[in-house]
Amino acid sequence: MATTTYPAVFAKADNAYTVYFPDFRATMVADEVTLEDAIDAAKELIAMRVYSSDDLYKFEMPEPSKLEDVKDGLAKGLYGKDLKEASVELVTVDIEKHIKENF
């Protein structure tokens, strides 16, 4: 697995972004950042998930959801009711490269 892409919900509040990955049921907060910075932080979360999916942790990477399914979920309020400035972005990361550069 060299490159992988997952959809994520990015919700802006003040100077922070809350990022939710429906496929991992994982949430992270990136404080005082731009959307681009929040996407970079989201890439690191994906890389850490893959990195920790070795035999020690037995974490299997789920199949990525379809972008449209996540957008529909956002519209239906599945990820929170008050996400006025939320968007769904595809987060793509070259896992091997990211791990070499950051771990």
Image (cartoon, rainbow, N blue to C red):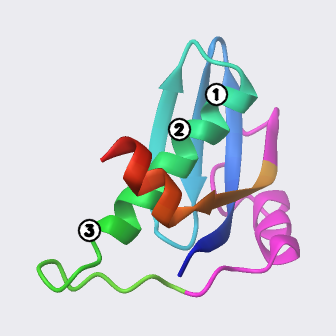
**Within 10 Å of the Cα at label 1, are there few (<14), some (14-19), or many (20+) other Cα atoms?**
some
Q: Are marks 2 and 1 in contact (CB under 8 Å)?
A: yes
Quick one: label 3 or label 1, which is nearer the N terminus?
A: 1
Q: Name the residue carrying label 3.
A: 52
Q: Which residue occupies 51% across, 28% down?
A: 30
The residue under the point 40% across, 55% down is: 99
Q: What residue type is disc 1 on?
A: Asp
Numbered range of the magenta stretch: 63-87
Along the polypeptide, which appears first: circle 2 or circle 3?
2
Q: Left or right of 102: which side holds 15?
A: right
Q: Is residue 29 above or below residue 103?
A: above
Q: Which mark is residue 41?
A: 2
Q: Quadrant of residue 79?
A: bottom right
Asked which secondary structure carries label 1, the reply is: helix
At label 3, the amino acid type is Ser
- Within 10 angstroms of label 3, few (less than 14), some, or many (20 or more) residues? some
Q: Position of residue 87 (x, y in %)?
A: 82, 45
**74 falls in the magenta region:** yes
Cβ atoms at labels 2 and 3 below 8 Å apart:
no
60 is higher (above) or lower (below) than 22:
below
Q: Which amino acid, by three-letter code, is at mark 2?
A: Ala
